[in-house]
């Protein structure tokens, strides 16, 4: 990412500025298999659904402020993330964050849709910075998804999506109590605020 473009956004902020990184992910009933411990001779067995997995999409955001505060915002949607879901999330974001919001996201088609662009233009406190193509390593939300998959959903096999969603929500509640972790996701990208 061009850090000069981000620095220019910071200078225009004045006062309370939230730097919000946004990304989408999907969860299913299938398991993320990880190594685990078990008593000798008792190999753990994971029983998964073999067919017709359903998927739940999530839009997640990590919001950072220069005063050291961070927030995690998350919304679930059945099926794929489309323009309508992005608009709902942007309204949710503006309702929960005061002051200027610098939104940093990738070039997903739903992000570039006309209704989304019109929404951004109609809200002067919302500024959009686009991440370069094929650069997920610059988005700290990718670290959030990796942490959720590796800790909250590791070796979880469920028959329906409701328990999977609850595992993710419980993981986000744990993350909110561990204030240093969202900053660790950001520092891993090499971007500083």
Image (spheres, helix red, strand yellow):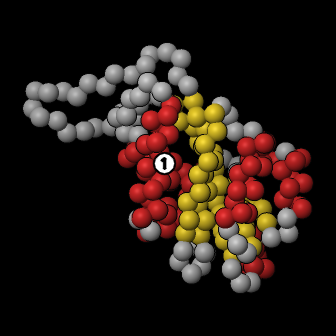
Instruction: Specify the farthest residue to the left.
Output: 40
Image label count = 1
| Image height of 3 relative to 81, above or below | below
Q: Quadrant of the C terminus?
A: bottom right
The residue at which mark 1 appears reads as: 169
Q: Quadrant of the N terminus?
A: bottom right
Instruction: Specify the farthest residue to the bottom.
Output: 15
Q: Residue at x 53, y 17 (%)?
A: 52
Residue 12 in view (yes/no): yes
Q: Is residue 117 left or right of residue 168?
A: right
Q: Residue at x 39, y 22 (%)?
A: 48
Residue 134 locus on image (x, y percent): 66, 47
| Image height of 64 relative to 88, above or below | below
Q: Residue at x 71, y 63 (%)?
A: 95
Residue 100 locus on image (x, y percent): 75, 73
Residue 34 locus on image (x, y percent): 33, 37
Residue 122 locus on image (x, y percent): 89, 62
Q: For the residue labelled by badge 1, is the local secondary structure a helix, a strand or a loop?
A: helix
| Image height of 193 relative to 31, above or below | below
Instruction: Specify the farthest residue to the top.
Output: 51
Q: Is residue 175 left or right of residue 74?
A: left
Q: Where, by quadrant of the figure, is residue 20 drawn?
A: bottom right
- Mark 1 surroundings within 10 Å by alpha-carbon count, few (fewer than 14), some (14 through 19), many (20 or more): some
Q: Is residue 128 left or right of residue 118?
A: left
Residue 4 in view (yes/no): no
| Image height of 3 relative to 28, above or below | below
Relative to the observer, which residue lies in front, 3 or 174? 174
Q: Residue at x 48, y 27 (%)?
A: 160
């Amino acid at each position: 990412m061009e850090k000069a473009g981000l620095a220019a956004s910071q200078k225009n902020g004045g006062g309370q500025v939230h730097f919000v990184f946004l990304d989408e992910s999907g969860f299913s009933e299938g398991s993320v298999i990880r190594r685990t411990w078990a008593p000798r001779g008792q190999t753990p067995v994971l029983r998964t659904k073999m067919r017709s997995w359903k998927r739940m999409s999530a839009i997640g955001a990590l919001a950072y402020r220069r005063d050291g505060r961070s927030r995690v915002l998350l919304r679930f949607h059945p099926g794929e993330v489309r323009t309508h879901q992005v608009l709902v999330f942007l309204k949710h974001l503006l309702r929960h964050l005061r002051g200027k919001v610098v939104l940093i996201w990738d070039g997903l088609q739903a992000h570039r849709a006309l209704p989304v662009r019109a929404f951004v233009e109609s809200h002067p406190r919302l500024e959009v910075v686009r991440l370069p193509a094929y650069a997920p390593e610059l988005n700290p939300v990718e670290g959030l998804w990796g942490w959720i998959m590796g800790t909250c959903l590791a070796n979880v096999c469920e028959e329906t999506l409701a328990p999977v969603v609850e595992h993710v929500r419980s993981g986000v509640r744990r993350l909110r109590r561990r204030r240093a972790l969202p900053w660790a996701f950001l520092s891993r990208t090499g971007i500083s605020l």
